[in-house]
Image (cartoon, grey):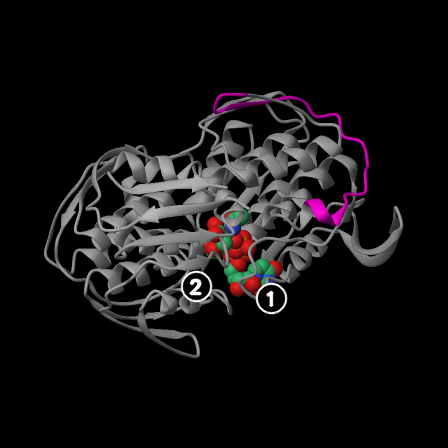
Amino acid sequence: MREYFIKGGNRLCGNVTVQGSKNSALPIIACAVMSGEKQVIHNVPLIDDVFSLINIFEQYGVVFQLNGHTLTVEQSNLSEVIIDPDMSKKLRSSSYLIGAILPNLKRLYLPIIGGCSLGLRPLDIHFRGFEALGGELFKENIIVGEKVLPYTVMKWERMIPTIIYLRYPSVGATINLLMLSSRMEGEVVIVNAGVEPEVKAVIDYLKKLGVVISGNKILKVRGKSRLKSAIEYINGDRIVVGDILLSVCATSGDCEVGGFESNEILPLLSKITKSPCKVSVKSDKIRLSIRSPLKVIAETAPYPGFPTDLQAQLSVAILASNGIGVVRENIFENRFKYVNELQKMGARTKVKGNTLYLMSSKLVGQRVTAPDLRGGSALVIAGLVARGYTNVENISLIERGYENLPDLYSRLGGEIKAIE
Ligand code: EPU
């Protein structure tokens, strides 16, 4: 099995540009399929989640061409298939089949959806919105090869423009409902929509395809039966920017990161800059130099709150910088699995319910296992700081979202490589 081998202790210094955003690229690929037209998308991150989603759409007959970081949807004449859940269990974004397939085929056999195991992650908000738009759904067991597997059958014959209230501003549900509304005539209103930058990226793209969308927390959408072709560019990944800035905090480093919309990282910067540091923020890059301990109280919340996808990396940066902190996780029920691994490295922590207490710790190299994508990335940062050598196992989870993490950190002076 492949793993990362890390020699800790180097300050991270230098300049880097980040990869395209995973959580924007995935729904934008789904929107491209939904459009039924030829589409070109630049700056697509070359990560396993993108390859898995492309594989799923290929089952439906979509033809893609990937040239470097440019993905072209050549043709999307879809035909009905029953996806093997072994494919859909690989990623949460297989839920975007709802928005991509239903406007075209009017029927979908939705398999069990996967993704990092961070908690229950139901799809009720997606389903209630779909039903409000006139969709019908029911559960059915279907024979696939030698197995009988559970599917949600979704049918969409009568489309009803309406007002939908989301009980929680779910990112995925907002995006699915935007996609469904984009091919309907009449106005759909989505109340309590997610406002994450990834939702905004999808809205900007749908507008290029000809959909009329206004609003923010309350979205008004006027779709078209036929959409246009467009060329899109995926913005830099704000979470990867956060990883880099927090690895700088953890190693008393000095870095410039570019290639993203800097406003998107202000929820994190507001926590870092409470400690003495030098920071310069331009519209598409940030320079951070810091040698002070982080003292942070943070709780995760929907945007512009502190992002749950940086919770684990923040915790490592607090510990490793000799700081102290209290971090509360409000979005997912089960996002502290990395803490056990950190304790093996000498971390002084205590978990009480959804709150993690952190005390400055001297981390030492260990063999640890990535429990999920972001928890794995946090363990890599811990390894870059720790005394001695760290092996991070289960890196296939990390590679779902990061395009060559060893290369990224090596460019900043970290010693990390993937080994067999
Ligand atoms: N939720 C429900 N019912 C639903 C939908 C969501 O109860 O129908 C709950 C979830 O269980 C969770 C909360 O609402 O507790 C937030 O879920 P949301 O739908 O907003 O998240 P998501 O669309 O499943 C995306 C990202 C996550 C990121 C969250 C929050 C993608 C592919 N995933 O997930 O990213 O943490 O938004 O910002 O865009 C990651 O990249 O590592 C990652 C987990």
Q: Which residue shows up at 40% across the image and 67% down it? A: 339
What crowding class fits label 1: few (fewer than 14 Cα within 10 Å), some (14-19), or many (20 or more)? few
Q: Which residues are magenta?
A: 67-87
Q: 176 above or below 225?
A: below
| Left/right of residue 239 with respect to residue 88 in the rendered view | left
277, 394: nearer the viewer = 394
The front one of 138 and 417 is 417
Q: Which dot, 2 or 1, sits closer to the camera?
A: 2
Question: Is 353 positioned to the left or the right of 160 in the image?
Answer: left
Q: Look at the numbered disc 1 and give the secondary structure of its residue.
A: loop
**Against 350, is 79 above or below?**
above
Tag on residue 339?
Answer: none
Q: Is residue 265 above or below residue 118?
A: above
Query: In the rendering, at what x and y percent does residue 7 appear?
Result: 30, 48
Question: Would you name the residue on which mark 2 appears?
Answer: 338
Q: What residue do we see at 19% from left, 46% from top?
A: 11
Residue at x 64%, y 59% (from the top left corner): 123
Q: Amino acid at mark 2?
A: Tyr
Q: Is mark 1 within 8 Å of ligand 1?
A: yes
**Amino acid of disc 1:** Leu
Secondary structure of the residue carrying numbered label 2 = helix
Image-quadrant location for residue 285: top left
Disc 2 CB within 8 Å of nearest ligand 1 atom: no
On screen, residue 132 versus residue 187, left or right, reads right
Q: Earlier in the sequence, mark 2 or mark 1?
A: 1
Residue 285 located left or right of residue 194: left
Q: Is residue 392 visible?
A: yes
Where does the image place residue 190, in percent across and percent down from the top left?
55, 52
- The residue indicated by pointer 1 is 120
Q: Nearer the viewer, residue 328 or 381?
A: 381
Give whichever of 56, 8 is nearer the camera.
8
